[in-house]
Amino acid sequence: MIKLQPYLLPVIALVATGISSPLFSQKTSVKDIDARVEALLVKMTLDEKIGQLHQVPGDISTGTDVAKDDLLTQIKAGKVGSILSHTNFDNKIAMQRAAVGTRLGIPLIFGFDVIHGYKTIFPIPLAQAASWDMGAIERAERIAAEEASADGQNWTFSPMVDVSRDPRWGRVMEGAGEDTYLASRVAVARVRGFQGDDLSKNNTLAACVKHFAGYGFAEAGRDYNTVDMSEQRLREIVLPPFKAAADAGCATLMNAFNVLNGVPASMDKHLLTDILRGEWGWKGMVVSDWNSFGETIIHGAATDEADASAKCLSAGSDMDMAGGTFQKGLKKALESGRVTQAQIDEAVRRVLRLKFSLGLFDDPFRYLDPKRRAATLEKPEYRLAARELAANSMVLLKNEGGLLPLRPDGPFKKIAIIGPLADSRSNKNYMSFWTLGLGDVSQYDTTKVVTPGMALKSSLEEAGFEVTITEICFNADCTEKDFSAALKATAAADLTIVCVGETGIDCGESRSVTDLNLKYNQEIIMKIAARGNMPTVMALFNSRPMTFQWASENIPAILVCWQPGFEAGNALADIITGAVNPSAKLPVTFPRSVGQVPIYYNALSTGRPQQQQGQMWTSGYLDSPTSPAYPFGFGLSYTTFSYSDIKLNKTKLRTGETLEVSVTVSNTGQHAGEEVVQLYIHDPAADIARPVKELKGFEKIKLDTYESKTVTFRLTEQDLGYWNHELKFKADPGKFKVFVGGNSRDVKEAGFEIVR
Ligand code: BGC
């Protein structure tokens, strides 16, 4: 029987006090929550306080039935504030019961990496960003939150908003790509999706924006590696998506593993206190990354657990994930005067506030209702949303001669589907490293995935095509002789779809690479398929930008499918048959070779830009053009779009005024389609060098055949400003260029001026 403490009683009359923040803008006012937190805090012992700052891994990491072992004892002793990565539902109930049964009855908060869906697996975050569809991304996270919250999770370690310009880094798949503006828009959509409009509802999750900060700029693309960058670049490129998430009311934030400009991010006071809580006025709770407090000792920036605890807590971090550093060191740090009781109390307050705001004190079991769980997980409409988003994330890079879509009345009747990823269910293929929430750890269920082979066979055969599926050797020992089945299959076909790419475990945390080419001789498979100019479609299943120069030059149709999730095959079939017209655009530049990395669209101009390869005394390579294989923002459709010249409502912009930039986009082809209209600026008259282009707006529009629409973007001085060398945010008077187009390379240009 659960003993209800006075502060566990439901709040009956809640009157808005006028003190509101997006974080706590629920039924329960901030003032009310604060009063309840203070009433609780005065009753807590030091050990109980340290317990609230201690987060312990659950069954995914330990593989054990944690509710029965030592963990339950620790919970009963009030030594645990939070559990992460735990799947077993009944054990969550047992753990919560143990927590609520303690002296003060403080409920646990369960955190989980809900990265691209929980039970229903959506495309990876990088793919979702390629949709440029903020509504669809928000909806995907709403569904993920419905499922995760019904399964007892209260808190997701998402969104990851780390901007990255380095495809070698395995976690590039978890972010929104290389652009800070797109990443900021995606961050807001994700936070809204997870948190909904009321964090205290039982179908919402607290979001956690991560990793603060600079993690995506690890040297050499090697995970966890050092980051060193100017404060100007930090503020301009790295921090805006965090700020956007914070402004959208994101409840929590996670430290980064890396050292940033010499300081381990978990003990970076400048980041956590001066910027995050000071300049931004953010009120949420900061959790470490996995043992990142303890790792400050390995960085050589703390001598022992007490020193690490003192440094991390005083910098502004609150909860200790997985490492147990606070458990070992925080009391000693207090006793030796390196932290104050007030500092510990402040961190505990933030944890308690989060638990109150989630409604956990009002009903600790509100997320643990077996009936809601049964009624919520894996609804058919969730799979439909996953299918739509997967198809709308697939980027068509090449479609020579309108090879796609395949029409029953077209020239091709016999279709061969070949390749190691034609019909594979091993290695979390088509999904990723992060598909954790698939039931108990040991019961990962690969049968949930619709493979390309399965879906293409049924949809193409239904449309009257003859289809063969040939899976091909996919390991380091594959040689040409293992590909004889492919040779046979393609010889008997009119057109081949080659499914190549990465396995699901080639990406994610600690999966950095030095080579972006297709591995295990997959290029040979493409050469077999395309021999003698046979019509060939390359379907690439990838977590990161990859390099495939031979295919770009020789394969007529190339589709970037990413890791599309459960509905991989159906989404691919929708694109191949034309049921869905591709509309996605690259959120990252695709290089020609790994040697070009880092390559990104919003670079500064050198003093010697290269016009053409080989030009002496210019900035380039002897052995490669400087341009990428495919630029940021690029993606084709089955139809074509034309852009009118840009119209401006004024050519001189004064303080307080708004510039309107309009362009008319027309569908000039045979299919209805969607276009992502993109707006970029360049400031050639600034006090410092500015990027050659910067994305400042986009709109995804639908156009029927031969339909036209006018899109108007609005810019103010705020959008034109930047962090200057004195670290002041300002816009300079003088000339500006504005560009509009369907990608970052092919644009129309106009000019205006800021006058004062
Ligand atoms: C990752 C985080 C993740 C955490 C919990 C860490 O290793 O860097 O992004 O949220 O583990 O699984």
Image (cartoon, rainbow, N blue to C red):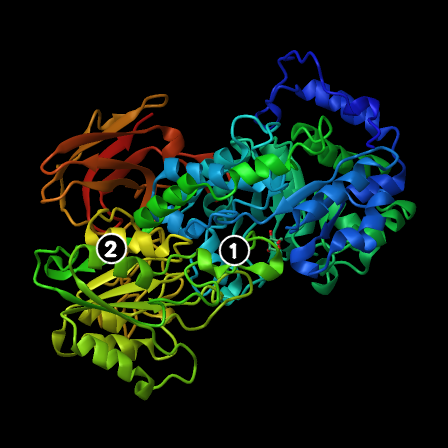
* Horizontal and vertical percent position of residue 433: 51, 60
Query: Circle 2 is placed at which residue position?
Result: 459
Q: Do the residues labelled 1 and 2 touch (CB within 8 Å)?
A: no
Residue depicted at x 39% and y 46%: 386
Residue placed most toward the observer, 382 or 540 = 382
Q: Residue placed farthest to the right in the image?
A: 335
Q: Quadrant of residue 354?
A: top right
Residue depicted at x 38% and y 83%: 478
* Horizontal and vertical percent position of residue 715: 32, 30
* Quadrant including the N terminus: top right
* Quadrant including the C terminus: top left
Residue depicted at x 14% and y 73%: 534
Judge depth for marks 1 and 2 and give the one in front.
2
Q: Could you tell me which secondary element the residue under label 1 belongs to?
A: loop
Q: In which quarter of the image is residue 551?
A: bottom left
Q: In this rendering, would 465 be left or right of 117?
A: left
* Horizontal and vertical percent position of residue 543: 41, 60
Q: Indicate the amino acid at tag 2.
A: Ser
Query: Circle 1 is placed at which residue position?
Result: 435
